[in-house]
Image: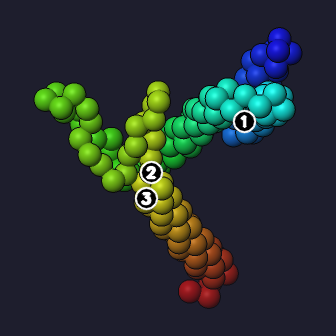
Amino acid sequence: MEIERVLLKSINYLPIGKFLGAKSAARLIKWKYDSRIRALRKCGDVKSVAQMLKDRDWELALIEAELKASETDRLVKKAQRKNVEYPKMPKWNDELEEYEPNDFWEFGYERPYLTAEGTAKVKEALRKEAKLAKTLQSIAWIVGIIVGLLTILRFFGIL
């Protein structure tokens, strides 16, 4: 029991990305609960098994929400850095005491994150921006080559 807690805590300090760390934590949580669930099933304690399954699903849902929030943070920062439009977070409605409904954002346990539709929209905008940047870079290369050729021709007196 103590070893499991130490392992789960130490994953945060490993020099790996959040995605791999969260996946490792999810694997450890599954391992921890599955061993307990097997023991309870052998004893025939159906009520405790159901509660353990709920607890395991809750912990896995927390990790999944954290992964989605981290991916959202990464995409939003990249979109801001490249000046790309992305779906803005909905505004807070004081009367309903909740955020206004939005197709692009969901609200997890701790932080909001983009839905699949919102993520797809941001990724598409980033791809379009990258394609435009590549096209502009190609045009700059062509202009540079033409200017270089004209300079050489002028230097040798051909023009």
Q: Horizontally, is 6 left or right of 131 in the view?
A: right
Name the outermost residue toward the left: 95
Amino acid type, callout 2: Thr
Name the outermost residue toward the bottom: 158
**Foreground of the two, 108 or 38:** 38
**Foreground of the two, 127 or 156:** 127
Task: From the image, tell me which residue sits under label 2.
Answer: 115
> Residue 56, labelled with which disc?
none
Q: Nearer the viewer, mark 1 or mark 3?
A: 1
Q: Horizontally, is 80 left or right of 39 in the view?
A: left
Amino acid type, callout 3: Glu
Amino acid type, callout 1: Ala
Q: Are marks 3 and 2 in contact (CB under 8 Å)?
A: yes
Q: Secondary structure at mark 1?
A: helix
Q: Residue at x 33, y 41 (%)?
A: 89
Q: Horizontally, is 71 left or right of 100 in the view?
A: right
Q: Residue at x 86, y 15 (%)?
A: 3
Placement of 86 over or under 146, stated as above or below: above
Q: Are marks 1 and 3 in contact (CB under 8 Å)?
A: no
Q: CA distance from mark 2 to mark 1?
A: 21 Å
Task: Where is residue 93? Give x, y as percent.
Answer: 19, 33
Task: Where is residue 105? Give x, y as percent.
Answer: 38, 46
> Residue 26, labelled with which disc?
1
Q: Quadrant of residue 38?
A: top right
The quarter of the rendered structure image containing the C terminus is bottom right
Label total for image: 3
**Foreground of the two, 13 or 101:** 101
Task: From the image, tell me which residue sits under label 3.
Answer: 117
Q: How is the image coloured?
A: rainbow
Q: Quadrant of residue 125?
A: bottom left
Q: Could you tell which of marks 2 and 1 lies nearer the N-terminus?
A: 1
